[in-house]
Image (cartoon, rainbow, N blue to C red):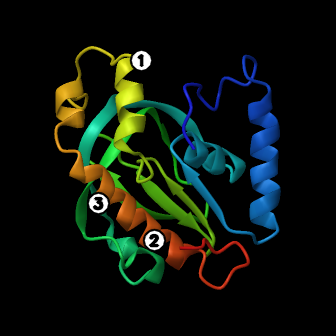
Amino acid sequence: MGGSMNVYETARYPWLSDETAFIASTVAAGKPVLGICLGAQLLAVALGAKVEPNCHQEIGWFSIYKTDAADGLSLFDIFPTEMDAFHWHGDMFHLPPGATHVARSAGCEHQAFIYGERAVGFQFHLEMTRTDAEQMVQSGLPEGGPFIQSAEAILAEPARFGQMNDLFHRWLSVFFAGTSAAPSS
């Protein structure tokens, strides 16, 4: 999931190295792995990709777009070609060797990837609730930038969070279908 640290801050957060090694071994074992935001960046690093600061921070509601490569991937059929998603990040992962690029946004080229059939990274947040967003906004927003919304804009439409969470739950059911890790309703 997310965090205030960056994947390359291993001197300050030594546990990041252990986490990355654990993720790599989990993928190698063929287990399903879903990384969101920092988790996606850790997954990308575990698979041999680089993570670095993005050109812009992306904080708030912005559209993501499925790539042509996502067409025909049943795991991504549930997503529309374009949809609004919640973002709160300043870094971007590069694509791991052998990964398929499945989503982008105007502010961040790499929004989602799949590696094999069971390792997926989302830079955006589908799990975010309004309460989560309220707490993040209260901790402070950076000033300015083309992809930084105000607290008012982020919280303006509470129904967005529920719609996004419903989509995420449906996607998780597809992602975990047929595995012992399938979520219950």
**Residue 182 lies in quadrant:** bottom right
Real-space Cα separation, disc 1 to disc 3, in angstroms: 25 Å
Real-space Cα separation, disc 3 to disc 2, in angstroms: 12 Å
Q: Quadrant of the N terminus?
A: top right
- Amino acid type indicated by mark 1: Ser
Residue 91 lies, in percent from the top left, at: 47, 33
Q: Secondary structure at mark 2?
A: helix
Q: Earlier in the sequence, mark 2 or mark 1?
A: 1
Q: Residue at x 59, y 82 (%)?
A: 177
On the question of residue 95 being in view, the answer is: yes
Residue 144 lies, in percent from the top left, at: 22, 17
Q: Residue at x 68, y 49 (%)?
A: 48
Residues tagged 2 and 1 counted as in contact (Cβ below 8 A) = no
- Amino acid type indicated by mark 2: Trp
Q: Is residue 48 above or below residue 30?
A: above
- Amino acid type indicated by mark 3: Gln
Q: Viewed as shown, does residue 61 lie left or right of 11?
A: left
Crowding at dot 1, Cα within 10 Å, few <14 / some 14-19 / many 20+, comes out as few
Name the residue carrying label 1: 139
Q: Viewed as shown, does residue 80 lie left or right of 153?
A: right
Residue 156 lies, in percent from the top left, at: 17, 37
Name the residue carrying label 2: 171
**Residue 179 lies in quadrant:** bottom right
Q: Earlier in the sequence, mark 3 or mark 2?
A: 3
Q: Secondary structure at mark 3?
A: helix
Name the residue carrying label 3: 163
Q: Is residue 41 above or below residue 148?
A: below
Crowding at dot 3, Cα within 10 Å, few <14 / some 14-19 / many 20+, comes out as few
Q: Residue at x 32, y 72 (%)?
A: 68
Q: Viewed as shown, does residue 64 lie left or right of 27?
A: left
